[in-house]
Image (spheres, rainbow, N blue to C red):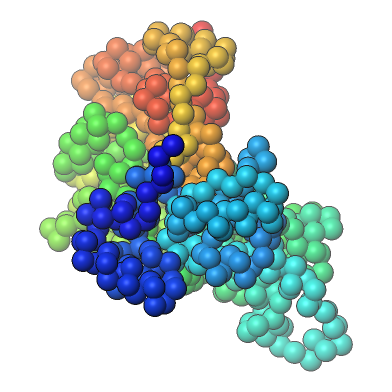
Amino acid sequence: MAARKRLGDILLERGLITSEQLMQALAEQQVSGDRLGNVVIKLGYATPEAIADALSEHLGYPRVNLARLQLVPEIIHLVPEELLKTNDILPLHIENNILTVAMTDPLNILIIDELQKITGMPINPVIATADEIRTALTRIQDLAATARKVFAEYIYDEEESKGEDVESQYLGDAPGVRLANLIVEQAVREHASDIHLEPQEDELQVRFRVDGILRKVMTIPRKLSSDVQSRFKVMANLDITERRRPQDGRIQYRVDDSDVDIRVSTLPTINGEKIVARIFSRAHGLLSIPELGFSEHTTSRLLQLLRLSQGMILVTGPTGSGKTTTLYSFLSHLNTVEKNIITIEDPVEYQLQGINQVQINPKVHLSFAAGLRSILRQDPDIIMIGEIRDTETAEIAVRSALTGHLVLSTLHTNNTTATIARLMDMRIEPYLISSTVAAIISQRLVRRICPECKQEVPLTDPVVIQFIKNLNLPVPKTVWKGSGCGLCNQTGYLGRTAIEEVLILNKELRQAIADRVSEDQLRKMAVATGMITLQENAVLKLTSGLTTTDEIVRTVYSVDEQEALG
C-alpha cells in the first residue's frame, strides 16, 4: 500500500509553492511547532482557499461551503469546544452513524483518531479553510442556544415595567430585542426569503422560507412572544398598540457588513398577530436576464421583446413564483440615461438607481389607477405596474400601451392563455388586448439539485412517467437527485431556477383573440406556433439534471393536471 503524500509534497506538485519555500516553511515549522498549512499561509506563500482547493482536488475529499450550512448544535456539542477551536474542526452531520467533520487538513490522523474516540463514530473528513470554520463556529452560538439563554434570563416584572415608556421596552438590550435581532440575522445568513412569526395557543412558532420551502426554526414561549413581535413592529415603524388590523412597514437592517431591506406585514389571527417579514438582500443584487434561469431560446426572445418601444409585456404566476424578480431584471436591462422609466408598486421591493419609483398609498388615495394617471403626465418611456389588480388599472395600462409606452406588469394567472381570459374578465375589449399585449410570460420556481451531492437514479415514479408520456415527450430511464450534503443542508437542493412558458402574439393569435376564441382553442394555436408549455419546460429541466421529479410534481403537475393527463 502506497504511503499517503504529505501536505508539503501536494502543495509542491500543485505548483502552489516552490522547493525553496517548502524548505523555509519546514524550517519555520520546526521552530513554531505549528501545522505546515498554517505556516505556508503565514509566510504568504499560498492562500487558505488555494490550499483547501488543492487538497480537495488531489485527495478527493469534498470541499464544503459552510456559509450556507444549517449547523446543528447537538452535533457540534458532541466535541469539546476547546478541541474544535484549537484544531479548526467542525462536526457537520451524522449519516449511517458516520460523523462528517470539516477540517483544514484531512490528513491529520491524530485529530481524526481523537474524534473517533470522543464520539464513538467513524469520521468522514471534508475540507474547509480555518477562517470558514471559525466563522461558522462563531455562528453556531446558534439561534436555539441563544434563545434558551434568553428564555432563562427573561423575567417579566409587571410592576417594574409600568412606569416605562412602552416602546423603550423594545429597544436596547432587552431579551425580546436580542431574540428578534437574532432571528433576523439567522434568516439572512441562511438565505431565507421570509420569516414567519406565527402565534399558536401557547407559543410563537418561528419558520424560515428557504428556496421556496418553509421549515420550523424554533418556538418562543408565550410570555416572551409579544416582546419579539413588538420589536419587529418597532423596527418597522408600526403602531405596537394596534393589534386588531393589518399593518405594513419596512426595516433596514445590517448583517455581516451587508445591508438588507425587510418588508413587514402583520395580520390579526385568533391567537394573536401573525408577522411575515420578507427579506431583500442588497448584497445579492438583481439578477440579469440570463441569470433568471430561463432557457437560452427564451432569453434570446425576451431580449428582442425588450427592444419594443410600445406594447405590454405581462409576467404571470402565483405568489412566490419570481414575477417581481423577473420584472426588476427587465428594468435593470432597460435602465439607460435616454429612457424615463417610472414604476408604481405596492410596495417598492428594490430601490433602483436612475428609475423613478412610486409607492402606492391608500391613506392619501394614491392607488395604482390614480398613480398611473399622474405617471402618464410625466413623459414616461417605460412604465412598470407592480400588479394589475382591477379593471380601472387594466384599462389605464392598456391605454398607456396604445399611446406609445412600453408597459410591464404582473397578473395572478396559471398560464399564458389564461391571462387573456383574465383580461377579458376585467372587461378589456378583445380588440384592445390583441392590439396592445406583445407577450405573456408564465413562470414558476423549482429548486435546483445540489451539484455536490448530485447523483443519477432510475426513474420509477409512475405519476411522472405518465405525465411525461402524455406530453408526448421521451421518457428517460434515469433522472437526477441530491443525496444531501453539508453544502445543501442535507436537503439535496441548492438555490432555485425558473421554468417558463412564453406566449408571443403573432398575427394569427391576435386575430383569434379579437374573434373571442375559447381559451382552450387559443392554447392549441399557441402550442402549434411553437410555444413550449410550462409542463414541457419542467420536463426539460428534469431531463437535463437541473431539478427532480418531486419538484415537477410540486410545481407544475398541479397547474393543470387534467391537461397533461388527458
Q: Residue at x 34, y 74 (%)?
A: 28
Query: In the image shown, does 61 or 324 lie closer to the viewer?
Result: 61
Q: Residue at x 38, y 64 (%)?
A: 37
Find residue 12 and report its horizontal and vertical position in percent. Answer: 26, 55
Find residue 67 and report its horizontal and vertical position in percent. Answer: 47, 57
- 393 is higher (above) or lower (below) than 72: above
The N terminus appears in which quarter of the rendering? top left
Q: Is residue 288 left or right of residue 172?
A: left
Outermost residue on the left side: it is 338
- 270 is higher (above) or lower (below) than 38: above
Find residue 25 and report its horizontal and vertical position in percent. Answer: 31, 69
Query: In the image shown, does 487 or 319 lie closer to the viewer?
Result: 487
Q: Quadrant of residue 293?
A: top left
- 473 is higher (above) or lower (below) than 184: above
Q: Is residue 379 left or right of residue 145?
A: left
Q: Quadrant of residue 472?
A: top left
Find residue 444 and report its horizontal and vertical position in percent. Answer: 44, 35
Q: Is residue 202 left or right of residue 76?
A: right
